[in-house]
């Protein structure tokens, strides 16, 4: 790989990993498995190591995932709360041991091995034995205060049990995991199914989403649990080892892991990992791995820590559970964007404690690559999600006459829902990978139901209670065509909605209907970025919607956006410059005279591009590219977009962006780096944008200010080298006040 190729791939991976961090930590709605996520992060770390000139302190490989969300007060941890590095095989585990032994200059190391609980990390602070605070990991140095929600956990003691002759520490941070038991998760999903709501994907995501609820009563109804296993700041010191900590936690009356293995050396640790694997399915909580830690706290301190993880501990991730069964049929689902997705209909099989009858097949290309055919015996994998995936077939056991899957033929060349035309097109990563078949009818009933369900999802407008079943019924009854039509459906109609059949009615009910009406009214006040994302504008994902929402006052401004037109103009200029370059591969100059003319033309094009970058495109990130610009402008200029905006106008809904008119920072471009004392980075960005300024991701001579906090990285160094003014949070607030 050349340096240029590496730089491009590094940029792609940083965007992808940052997006998955956002989905996992803040939205509690990951789209890929932990294994796939770790693969991306490892590739990124490998490239940064091979090409150190492209390394950055702001890379996702150098920071802890950030779970902070709006609505909670931030609190600083007394001791940094790190994450763990992962390993997936014995060789990697032993390599970690070798590095540790070299660091500590001894191979005689004692370890503890304990279950890795699949939940949300939390830090509890007890002062003189009394619980005073519960804080999420956040971004490592500070997190969200969730004390009120944590106090709903029945198994969490408010006071540490008294140990005769051993007073409690004056202050101690005890780390652990908040989780949902499998039984409680099943109960919650059963209630949602009865109400026609979308089922939650897995216990981990549900627990993470629950602890970040603003309604404490709703948190209490979900019956969270907690387990404690680690130590943060402790004054005065209370224990000297992980073994001693486990015993002390138990003596204090705190819930701890059922089993802790003591292992002298890495061979014993590896054996303990195998024993845990045989037992873990009987635990009340989900476990996706084993955590191996140095037992002695003194050795832990000597080993130290890296930027995001301790060197003295590592997580061994177990392979996802798999099972063999027969593929009975391949059915086709149509999503909110019209993508036709194949689904495996399976002979029911027990896997990881539940009976599986369906699994995802991703797309037609994946089916052909793996050579999966109807009638095959297949291996399926459950990696924490409700619907598992088909891993591979067993061709040696294939019945004669099994044919390759052809999606076009399977649906008769038309959409299986509306009968409309389908086409094979490039689609966004959130829909499918690469190329897929797509229904071309925007008003397809399946697409309408999918858009309505997404419109109400927690990542969009958070109209809780309206899941896939209710959305499909509203569309089927022609009560909703476009998502905003939901506002026209009366409470009485929602309450009497029959989600079952005439013979076996299942009435939605007034309680559920009232919840939806209240939530949809609350959504009126949400900002432009949320509404833009919720309306499923093609090619506009969550990050892009946020950027566009920060740069446009309202939908009217977005529909006629000079910024998006400037993006397209720059793309056209870049294309022209590539074609006119004297050494263009497509069209090389043939004479010296032509070379001179082209150089002059390219200089003019460069000047126009630079003017756009310094003017309307200053601070605009790469996510807002020509594909997004063309798609958004086209959408709002044509039927569906025009119809949506007209409907919002009729409803009196006018979401506002965060961009402001001329202010104290008009014409100024800021770059942010490091951790600010009190402001979250997004809050600081909002203040800058509201005052007319722009925010960029990189420092240049045209940068007006670099806003720097603690642990500022390479951006601060570059600002100093270029002579760019560097300010702190206090100075930012002073300038805003002026």
Image (cartoon, helix red, strand yellow):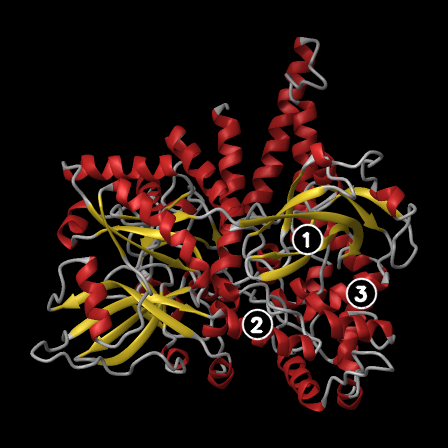
Disc 3 to disc 1, how far (Cα)?
Answer: 24 Å
Disc 2 to disc 1, how far (Cα)?
Answer: 19 Å
Q: Nearer the viewer, residue 316 or 218?
A: 316
Q: Are marks 2 and 1 in contact (CB under 8 Å)?
A: no
Disc 2 to disc 3, how far (Cα)?
Answer: 29 Å
**Neighbours of disc 1 within 10 Å: few (<14), some (14-19), many (20+):** many
- Up-down: is 647 above or below 117? below
The quarter of the image holding the C terminus is bottom left
Report the disc number at residue 487: none
Q: How many marks?
A: 3
Which residue corresponds to mark 3? 448
- Up-down: is 256 above or below 147? above
Q: Earlier in the sequence, mark 2 or mark 1?
A: 2
Of discs 2 and 3, which sits in the foreground? 2
Which residue corresponds to mark 2? 186
- Residue 306 is situated, as x and y percent measured from the top left of the image, at 28, 46
């Amino acid at each position: 790989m050349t340096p240029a190729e590496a730089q491009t791939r590094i940029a792609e991976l940083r965007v992808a990993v940052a997006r998955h961090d956002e989905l996992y930590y803040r939205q509690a709605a990951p789209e890929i498995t932990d294994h796939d996520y770790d693969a991306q992060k490892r590739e990124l770390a490998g490239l940064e190591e091979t090409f150190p000139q492209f390394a950055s302190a702001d890379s996702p490989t150098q920071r802890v995932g950030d779970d902070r969300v709006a609505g909670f007060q931030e609190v600083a941890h007394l001791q940094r709360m790190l994450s763990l590095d992962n390993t997936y095989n014995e060789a990697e585990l032993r390599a970690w041991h070798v590095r540790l032994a070299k660091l500590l200059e001894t191979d005689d190391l004692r370890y503890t091995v304990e279950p890795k609980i699949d939940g949300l990390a939390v830090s509890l602070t007890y002062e003189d034995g009394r619980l005073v605070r519960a804080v999420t990991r956040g971004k490592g140095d500070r997190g969200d205060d969730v004390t009120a929600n944590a106090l709903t956990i029945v198994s969490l003691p408010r006071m540490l049990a008294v140990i005769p002759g051993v007073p409690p520490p004056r202050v101690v941070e005890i780390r652990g995991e908040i989780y949902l038991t499998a039984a409680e998760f099943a109960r919650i999903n059963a209630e949602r199914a009865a109400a026609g709501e979308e089922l939650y994907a897995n216990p981990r995501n549900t627990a993470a989403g629950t602890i970040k609820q603003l309604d404490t009563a709703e948190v209490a109804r979900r019956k969270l649990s907690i387990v404690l296993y680690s130590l943060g700041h402790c004054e005065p010191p209370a224990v000297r080892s992980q073994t001693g900590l486990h015993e002390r936690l138990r003596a204090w009356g705190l819930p701890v892991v059922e089993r802790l293995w003591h292992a002298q050396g890495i061979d014993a640790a590896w054996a303990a990992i195998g024993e845990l694997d045989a037992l873990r399915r009987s635990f009340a909580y989900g476990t996706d791995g084993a955590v191996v830690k140095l037992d002695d706290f003194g050795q832990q301190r000597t080993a130290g820590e890296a930027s995001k993880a301790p060197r003295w501990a590592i997580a061994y991730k177990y392979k996802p559970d798999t099972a063999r069964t027969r593929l009975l049929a391949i059915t086709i689902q149509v999503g909110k964007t019209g993508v036709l997705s194949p689904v495996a209909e399976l002979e029911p099989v027990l896997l990881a404690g539940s009976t599986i009858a369906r699994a995802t097949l991703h797309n037609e290309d994946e089916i052909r690559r793996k050579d999966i055919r109807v009638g095959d015996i297949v291996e399926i994998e459950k990696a924490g999600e409700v619907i598992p995936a088909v891993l591979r077939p067993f061709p040696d056991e294939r019945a004669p006459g099994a044919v390759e899957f052809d999606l076009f033929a399977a649906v008769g060349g038309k959409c299986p829902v509306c009968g409309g035309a389908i086409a094979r097109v490039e689609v966004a990563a959130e829909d499918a990978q690469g190329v897929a078949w797509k229904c071309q009818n925007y008003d397809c009933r399946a697409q309408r139901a999918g858009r309505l369900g997404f419109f109400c999802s927690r990542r969009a407008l958070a109209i809780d209670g309206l899941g896939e079943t209710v959305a499909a019924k509203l569309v089927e009854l022609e009560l909703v065509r476009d998502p905003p039509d939901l506002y026209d459906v009366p409470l009485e109609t929602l309450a009497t909605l029959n989600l079952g059949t005439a013979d076996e009615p299942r009435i939605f009910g007034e309680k559920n209907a009232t919840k939806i009406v209240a939530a949809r009214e609350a959504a009126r006040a949400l900002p432009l970025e949320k509404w833009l994302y919720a309306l499923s504008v093609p090619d506009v994902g969550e990050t892009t919607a946020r950027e566009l929402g920060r740069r446009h006052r309202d939908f009217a401004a977005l529909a006629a956006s000079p910024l998006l037109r400037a993006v397209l103009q720059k793309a056209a200029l870049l294309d022209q410059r590539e074609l006119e370059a004297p050494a263009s591969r497509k069209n090389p100059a043939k004479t010296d005279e032509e070379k001179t003319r082209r150089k002059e033309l390219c200089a003019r094009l460069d000047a126009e591009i630079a003017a756009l970058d310094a003017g309307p495109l200053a601070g605009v990130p790469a996510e807002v590219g020509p594909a997004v610009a063309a798609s958004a402008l086209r959408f709002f200029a044509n039927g569906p977009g025009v119809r949506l905006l007209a409907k919002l106008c009729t409803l009196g809904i006018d979401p506002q962006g965060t961009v402001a008119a001329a202010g104290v920072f008009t014409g100024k471009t800021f770059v942010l780096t490091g951790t600010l004392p009190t402001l979250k980075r997004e809050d600081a960005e909002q203040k800058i944008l509201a005052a007319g300024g722009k925010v960029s991701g990189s420092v240049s001579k045209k940068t007006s200010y670099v806003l720097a906090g603690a642990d500022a990285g390479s951006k601060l160094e570059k600002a100093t080298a270029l002579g760019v003014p560097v300010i702190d949070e206090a100075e930012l607030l002073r300038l805003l006040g002026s």
